[in-house]
Image (tube, grey):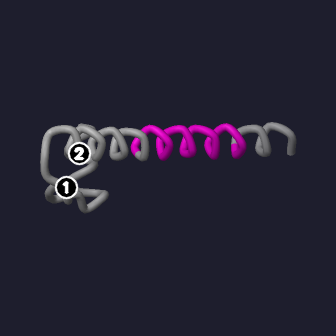
Amino acid sequence: PVFGDMKNNRGFKRFLLRGLPKVSLEVGWLSLAHNLLKKAAVDVKKQRAKREHAA
């Protein structure tokens, strides 16, 4: 699901850099972005639940 999400939802079609070290770095950046977006979504969900519970 992660690679499908990167390809379909994020528009990642091909690597921009050439060479294994550079491609590894690019995959690392893509993974970091994916994980940060997941964390942000969880945080938003928690904030909404907290607001609904307080109201």
- Is residue 40 shown in magenta? yes
Mark 2 — residue? 22
User: Which SS type dominates the magenta stretch?
Assistant: helix
Apparent side of residue 30 relative to residue 14 in the rendered image (left or right): right
**Disc 1 + disc 2, Cβ < 8 Å:** yes
Looking at the image, which residue sits at the far right?
55
Report which quarter residue 22 is drawn in.
Answer: top left
Going from N to C along the chain, the mark reached first, 1 or 2, is 1
Q: Residues within 10 Å of mark 1 (few under 14, many from 20)?
A: few
Q: What amino acid type should be assigned to the residue bearing mark 1?
A: Leu
* Among the 4 quarters of the image, the one containing residue 11: bottom left
Identify which residue is drawn at 63% across, 46% down: 44
**Residue labelled with disc 1:** 17
Residue for point 67% across, 37% down:
46
Q: Calculate the distance from the C-alpha at mark 1 to the C-alpha at mark 2.
A: 6 Å
Give coordinates of residue 43: x percent, y percent: 63, 40
The magenta-colored residue range is 34-48
Q: Residue at x 57, y 44 (%)?
A: 40
- Taking depth in this image into account, of 33 and 44 the one nearest to the observer is 33
Q: Quadrant of the N terminus?
A: top left
